[in-house]
Amino acid sequence: MSEVVLSIDKLSKRYGRIKALDELSLDIEKGNIFGILGPNGSGKTTTLGIVLDAINATSGSFKWFGETPTKNHRKKIGAILESPVFYPYMSATKNLEIIAEIKSASYDQIPEVLKTVDLFERRNSKFRTYSLGMKQRLAIAAALLGKPEVLILDEPTNGLDPKGISEIRDIIKKIASVGLTLVLASHLLDEVQKVCTHVAILEKGKKLFSGRINEILKETLYVEVGSPDMKALHASLSIFNKVQIVEADDNVIAVKLDEKMDSSELNKYLLEKGISISHISIKKKSLENYFLELLAESHDKTS
Amino acid sequence: MIRLLNIEFKKVIYNKTFWVLLGLYGIILGGILIGVQTFINELMVDVGKDAPIPVSKISLYEFPGIWQNFTFLAGNFKIILAMIVIIIITNEYSYKTIRQNIVTGMSRMDFLMSKLLMTFVISLAATIFIFILGFILGVINTPEVTFLMIFEKTVFIFAYLLELFAFLSFALLLGLLSKRSGFAIGLFFLYYYVIERFINYKLPDDWGDFLPLRAIANLIDTPNTALMKLFGYNFREVVAPQDVIVVLSFTALFIYLMFLILKKRDL
Ligand SMILES: Nc1ncnc2c1ncn2[C@@H]1O[C@H](COP(=O)(O)OP(=O)(O)O)[C@@H](O)[C@H]1O
Ligand SMILES: [Mg+2]
């Protein structure tokens, strides 16, 4: 029996004219190591911020453990949202005492979690004096306080040097092996691929794919279709349940075919619908390539 | 509630700015309250030289008058406490710890409650400070102390507590609104010394008494010392119920606005 830990239903968030999240639906089950993968600005932090009550959704809803969310659910969740955040003038221990106080957790766990992230020796140094890697590790220690059932890590290796990155990944693997539910948001496919069992791919606030991680690596047949009447083509394809639209622009629509389908069957369907086809071609593409393309695109835009 | 307050104490205990400002407040206010009598009497001797009627030395420290004298004087220094409160709230925004507090498991209302509790504790501590100082100086300087004398006008102590809490709630609101300490403190001074005075000037007659900071200042009127009488003034020696009601209403409004801001705003 799988138990849904977090269920997100048509969540949307607007910032003025920007749609940061667009009707996102997602289920995360108990024991999943769930990756949320997407280029910068795709809505990962927004999603996590909403389910942690830091951000108000414009519409849609979510449930924790099948219940309407309250602060008590959050006490069972350990989370890092974006950069590590602590009181700079206080030591690691004192900062963790505040977290323990909020979570109604015992102070006895503090040395233990500090050891897990290898910060015990530096427990009495002020947070301000920490390097970025240490700050990130302290954030993980804080998230581990109160023995959470769910751990949420948002870009835990962002901005770190290679040594820092490998330290954090080791910690994540260690945590992931104890069987709690882990949600890892990242723009790095490599990172998600290494630790996650499940993944959802976001782009511009929309979900492109969600499922088991091994599916993302599997090559799939894609068919690109073009027509003089793109509107009609799009309409026909979107109601056809044997294909899934993965990309659409003004000239061509790319669809993923069902396992037992081939392109001639698609051709036949479109002819029956009375749609003239100006272009049809078969492409082999893995979601990995697809994701990398997306990334490249978003990098072009930012650089 | 105890837990929320405990969390607030933990945040504040290692915060140097907090202690520096609090120490400054205690030293300045304590020094002035202890030295004020000597200062005024020196002044009186000067003024008295040319006065048509003889001016007697005054005692600010005698029960029961001391309560109004002290709370009135102390009221001028509450701006330092307002700065402390502004820093306490804006720190949470500049460090982004408000977000962490909520994500970790506080509700937004818990957060507001913890800040209001801290504001109340600061108000209470400042009130107790005045009470203790007043009590000691009063006992030393009142010729024949009776129990009744001591407690006759302690209503001013309660009025002072209300004055502080209302004033500091306003500071908390500005801090929450602007998120940045410098901006909030600037806004506070601008409103306190310019905007509200200007509005008051434009309003007909007594309407200004319904402005928040003015109403708060009205709670405790200027004491009627011999000096004041010399200049022909006659001030209220009681706390007016109207002022109490206006101030309580504004405090409730401030708290409600903070509630709305925290509920609606992304962190
Ligand atoms: N406070 C904000 N105001 C305006 N736009 C925002 C704000 N926060 C995020 N956005 C926008 O929302 C989109 C999603 O952002 P975010 O969730 O942070 O993406 P990610 O975490 O995947 O990098 C981006 O286009 C970003 O610019
Ligand atoms: Mg992000």
Image (cartoon, coloured by chain):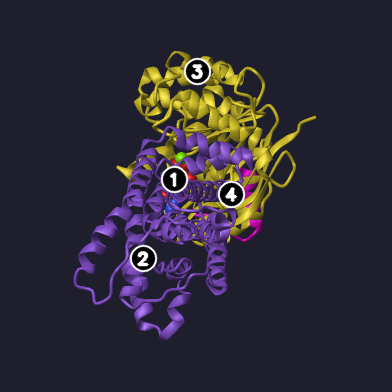
Chain colours: A yellow, B purple
Q: Is residue B155 above or below residue A24?
A: below
Which circle's residue, 2 or 1, is located before the other in the chain? 1
Asked whether the residues under marks 2 and 1 belong to the same chain, the reply is yes
User: What numbered label is drawn on residue B113?
Assistant: 4
User: Which residue is the extreme one toward the bottom?
Assistant: B204
Mark 2 neighbour class, 10 Å CA radius: few under 14, some 14 to 19, many 20 or more: some
User: What numbered label is drawn on residue B192?
Assistant: 2
Q: CA distance from mark 4 to mark 1?
A: 13 Å
The residue at which mark 1 appears reads as B88
Q: Position of residue A301 (x, y in %)?
A: 34, 46
Q: Looking at numbered disc 4 in the image, what kind of residue is underneath it?
A: Met
Which circle's residue, 2 or 4, is located before the other in the chain? 4
User: What numbered label is drawn on residue B228?
Assistant: none
Q: Looking at numbered disc 2 in the image, what kind of residue is underneath it?
A: Tyr
Q: CA distance from mark 1 to mark 3?
A: 30 Å
Q: Chain of mark 1?
A: B
Residue at horizontal 45 percent and vertical 19 percent from the top: A123
Q: Is mark 2 within 8 Å of ligand 1?
A: no
As helix, strand or loop, the secondary structure at mark 4 comes to: helix
Q: Is residue A217 above or below residue B210?
A: above
Q: Look at the image and say whether residue A274 sits in the magenta stretch.
A: yes
